[in-house]
Image (spheres, grey):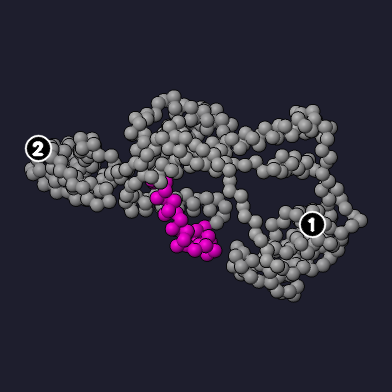
Amino acid sequence: MKITLENEKDNVVRLDITIPAKDAAEAYNNAVKRISQYINVDGFRRGKAPRAVVERHVGIDRIKQEALDAVLPAVLTKAIDENKLDIITQPYVTSFKFDVGADMQVVAKVETRPEVTMGDYKGLTVKVQENEIPADAVQHSIDNLLNQHSTLELVVDRAAKDTDITVIDFEGFVGSAAGEKIKGGEGKNYPLDLAHSNFIPGFAEQIVGKKLNDEFEIKVTFPADYHDEKLQGKDAVFKIKINEIKERVIPELNDEFVQKVSAFKTVDELKADVESFLKSQKETRDKHSAENEVFKTVVDSAKVDIPQSMIDREAASLRADYEQRLAAQGLTWDIITKSQNESELLKTISEDAVLRIKNSLVIDKIAKEENIKIERGDIETKINEIASAYRMTPTDVLKQFGKNPEFVASLSQQVLNDKVRDLLMANNKVEFVKPKAKKEKVESK
């Protein structure tokens, strides 16, 4: 067998393969035998029909294709291995010439991994912006805890405040109360939190100041980007009736409350635990920030020409993932692109594809340079991490994901990513710097 390689543009390698006539003829005859096993030919038992009869029955071209399909995988694997080609796509046949009694000529192409030229990835000093704990973080956490244990009490002797929760009947009309009824724009005994309303801007604000059993109308304008095109920018009137007003009552922060809702005995102990938790969160964020900044510095210094075909494949995969997430929310690509510029969205996806490809190529290059290997224990550790994160057993993780062929590849890539990042963190220095103070706007008088 003779193999000639030719490098074409965009990391495509052309393989001109010559299979000797003897081997080609043997592959053809084997194909005839296989085909004869599953066809019915009058006057012959299965597998016993002569070659000429099989050729007349199914056609020579079909036999040639069967022979080619049988012999080519091993031939291409040998060609790739012997020439140490680092491929990123499966080889594909562009043409072949197969005349029984003559050498078989096959032309195949395969895309190889782009070569990465690394900059320095060891001995660097990388400045990383430190994550800060806001001055009011502890109090904010305490306030959240108090809110979680708040109670709602009915209000009958005053008007609704902007912190209340109301229970309302509402009915909406386009333009005026005599206009077209808004589809889906009505509700009975609907609880509306006036402080955290996701209704049309201005809706909740106009309920403030109204009293129990009040019936009134409010006027609003639908946003220009409202999901229902028919209502975008339209004025509307809503008839409202207040059925209930509820006030959120926040419990008092004292030792008794702390003992009731936690394992601590005093307010000071609770605050100390919150401070410890916030500090732990900060350290975790600092660690991630450092890893990301060091990796970004290394990637930015690397040089690689990424073929457009590789970018297109990754972008198509990213778009498919994005559309799948949209579908889970009841949305489609067409709906999204009506409110967003489609060309800008596609540009963003393409840029993300380039970044993901470059990140992956750099990781693989460093792993190769540093002879980083994935051991069985690494995979087991990663499975245990996933099991812990999803509150599953390692066995359950394997059962759930093990049937997916992509799971093992994804798991291996995650392990490799972690090992490369660990190496980078061990061989580079990080200097944390304080965030730049935000400039306050000076209002002109």
List x then y, in percent, for residue 122.
Answer: 40, 35
Amino acid type of the residue that numbered disc 1 sits on in the rendered structure: Asp
> Residue 22: which disc?
2
Residue 410 versus residue 392: which sits nearer the camera? 410
Residue nearer the viewer, 435 or 77: 435
Camera-near label (2 vs 1) is: 1
Give the residue furthest to the left: 101
Q: Give the answer, above or below, for where 214 lies relative to 3.
A: below
**Are discs 2 and 1 less than 8 Å apart at CB?**
no
The single residue placed furthest to the front in the displayed view is 445
Amino acid type of disc 2? Lys
Q: Identify the residue at image location x=34%, y=41%.
A: 118
Q: Pointer 2: residues within 10 angstroms few (<14), some, or many (20+)?
A: some
Please name the residue that numbered disc 1 is placed on.
Answer: 162
How much space separates mark 2 and mark 1, taking CA atoms? Answer: 89 Å
From the viewer's perspective, tell me whether residue 214 is left or right of residue 57. right
**What percent of the width, then of the height, locates residue 327?**
53, 53
Magenta stretch: dominant secondary structure:
helix
Name the side, left or right, on which 27 lies relative to 411.
left
The residue drawn where x is 50% and y is 41% is 127
Which type of secondary structure does the marked residue at label 2 adopt? Answer: helix
Q: Where is residue 183 in the image (x, y as percent from the top left)?
A: 67, 65
Q: In which quarter of the image is the C terminus?
A: bottom right
The residue closer to the viewer here, 250 or 63, is: 250
Can the viewer see residue 54?
no
Q: Which quarter of the picture shows residue 176?
A: bottom right
Q: Residues within 10 Å of mark 1 (few under 14, many from 20)?
A: some
Q: Give the range drawn in magenta.
A: 332-359
